[in-house]
Image: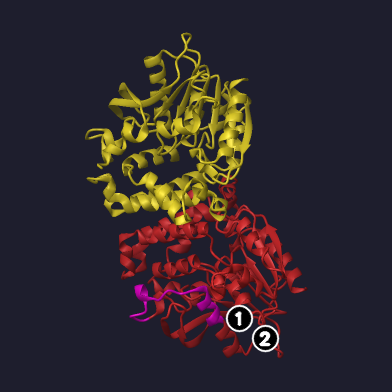
Chain colours: A red, B yellow
Amino acid sequence: MSDRSYYSQAFHGPFETFDLGHIDLESGYRLRGAKIAYRTIGSLSAAKDNAILFPTWYSGTSGIIEQAYVGSGRALDPGKYFIIIANQIGNGLSSSPSNTAAPFGAAGFPSISIGDDVNAQHALLTRQFGISELQLVLGGSMGAQQTYEWVVRYPDFVKRAAPIAGTARATAHNKLLVQTFIDAITSDPNWNSGSYAQSSSVHRGLSRHARAFAASGFTPKLYATEGWRGIGFTSSDDFVTAFVEAHFAPQDANNLLVMLRKWQNGDASRNTGGCLKTALSKITAKVSVLAIAEDHFFPLADIEAEQQMIATSELKKISSPWGHLALFGTDPSYNLAIDTHLNALLSA
Amino acid sequence: MSDRSYYSQAFHGPFETFDLGHIDLESGYRLRGAKIAYRTIGSLSAAKDNAILFPTWYSGTSGIIEQAYVGSGRALDPGKYFIIIANQIGNGLSSSPSNTAAPFGAAGFPSISIGDDVNAQHALLTRQFGISELQLVLGGSMGAQQTYEWVVRYPDFVKRAAPIAGTARATAHNKLLVQTFIDAITSDPNWNSGSYAQSSSVHRGLSRHARAFAASGFTPKLYATEGWRGIGFTSSDDFVTAFVEAHFAPQDANNLLVMLRKWQNGDASRNTGGCLKTALSKITAKVSVLAIAEDHFFPLADIEAEQQMIATSELKKISSPWGHLALFGTDPSYNLAIDTHLNALLSA
């Protein structure tokens, strides 16, 4: 398998691609011939008033999100809603280091911001679908960062929002944690400042990155109770290797780094001169802020501190031994709680 | 400054050295001319019945422990007790990669177990001081591992024990976390499988290791509340660099790795064929199990699960935004809680 074939519909389920043309990035660079990959489920109503947007989290694609969150009988019911899952820039399906030509491909890919993603998604919604209103924008982790950016930037566009397990502005602790993930990859001499022939040659760095991710992404309780047995793993080493390392091993190192740096710099207060309170006061959408109580990536207290600055919001706490990575949909009680909170928000 | 000069009394305060002679390690190797460095404060009574043993934690030495835990008016009062702080093997003061001759020095240093440390300390106490009873053995983190080993191995020797923020057996999560610290160092090409001329050439790996340590060792709350301001740092980056990186930068990479691997393999149930319950049932000392509620290295639930297997124990919870690294003594309320619990234990 070549590195590229991983980023295909065979691996990630069906998706379509919209040509954005040239997009001007916050970094000052222009990305020419940019593309956004997206998946839609359900039908857009004639009035175009039943759309939901769900941007992807770090290293995820539209396929896992559809699998974990969308379905008949779920809150995100394609019988009612037109659900658009937007792959974030850098994830390998949308424009990314791995699919962009020199001099902007691979190590030359420009720095991307959460704001760049929201601009690309806005273009997709308005130009491809003629949508001017979203019933809901939601996302987990980096998807929550994009959700906050949406409601701060486009208050009139978004009726409801559900940022899950993420913050509007990365905290000092979060930046430090993400730096350890970056360090795990860039410390591999085969990464070679991003100039490698095959990402698989960076396998030691990717493996270290996966272990660091697994150590903080799940809770100590998950390991203590061997909660991974329920999804088919035989030991903690097997779980970390066959679940987490296997998830990252086929991914492109430069793609991951573009996303990690975007995560680390996530900051909705860029829009208001660095004042987070002012940024969050722009929100008019009804917001259900969903936090995972045991989350070590985006701790409850950090999420709650932001939630208290949003007048139209409520905080809902979900408990899971899977911690931050309950996002993946492996914990039925987490999935049930998500649907309960989203149903309440959608019917409000 | 050479690498070695760091491991001196100039940096770590006064200590003495006891020649252990040849010691046979659990690994099967014999360490010839082994030495244990220790610090005593107070006077041994004529009856030799006022001794307290305090082994060191990971990367710590007797100096920091004396500073943080010992003093007139503290629970560990040298006016009452003869306090022996034993430097663990591998910490640079006792026998370590950095001070042992070839072929057992540097990368050739044999694997060390928590049991090897306890054997060395037992030899120190009995042969150097003629002590056959300890009023108290206590320690934090890897010091707690050694404390558990003591009370399982030498129940008649120890009247009281206070393992702080540590476990008798490393959990799967703990092993994974320690592996990320190991990975951070060994991923540096200059580490070169342990064969380097100067540990300072491994500075990139040591810096990554420090950042990973800081990301989990302190709590997100410490960063959110800028709790490091109280001890003289100006930003989270300054704190991580000037406090944590500065702590590790002068240390020898192979020394740190000997301790990390010892930590990872810490398991008092080695003494009872792998059955932890049987191991802990051997304990006759009165045990005050001290846990830090916010600890991400040794989470409360993991500590509590072991404590419930010790009939003679009580669990005491201490809360600190400093998390695991409250051990360093930077949080006055942690220090006060420690003294309260140790005073209660010592008067029992």
- Per the rendering, the mark at residue A44 is 2
Q: Quadrant of the C terminus of chain B?
A: top right
Residue B257 placement: quadrant: top left
Rendered location of residue A214, percent (x, y):
50, 55
Relative to B344, B67 lies left or right: left
Callout 1 amino acid: Thr
Q: Are marks 2 and 1 in contact (CB under 8 Å)?
A: yes
Residue designated by label 1: A40
Q: Residue at x 24, y 46 (%)?
A: B196
- Per the rendering, the mark at residue A127 is none
Q: Quadrant of the N terminus of chain B?
A: top left
Q: Please state which of residues B79 and B53 is positioned toward the viewer in this rendering.
A: B79
Magenta region: A101-121
Callout 2 amino acid: Leu
Q: Residue at x 56, y 85 (%)?
A: A124
Is residue A111 located in the magenta-colored stretch of the structure?
yes
Vertical placement of A211 versus A147: above or below?
A: above
Rendered location of residue A39, percent (x, y):
57, 79
Q: Secondary structure at mark 1?
A: strand
Callout 2: few (<14), some (14-19), or many (20+) C-alpha neighbours within 10 Å?
many
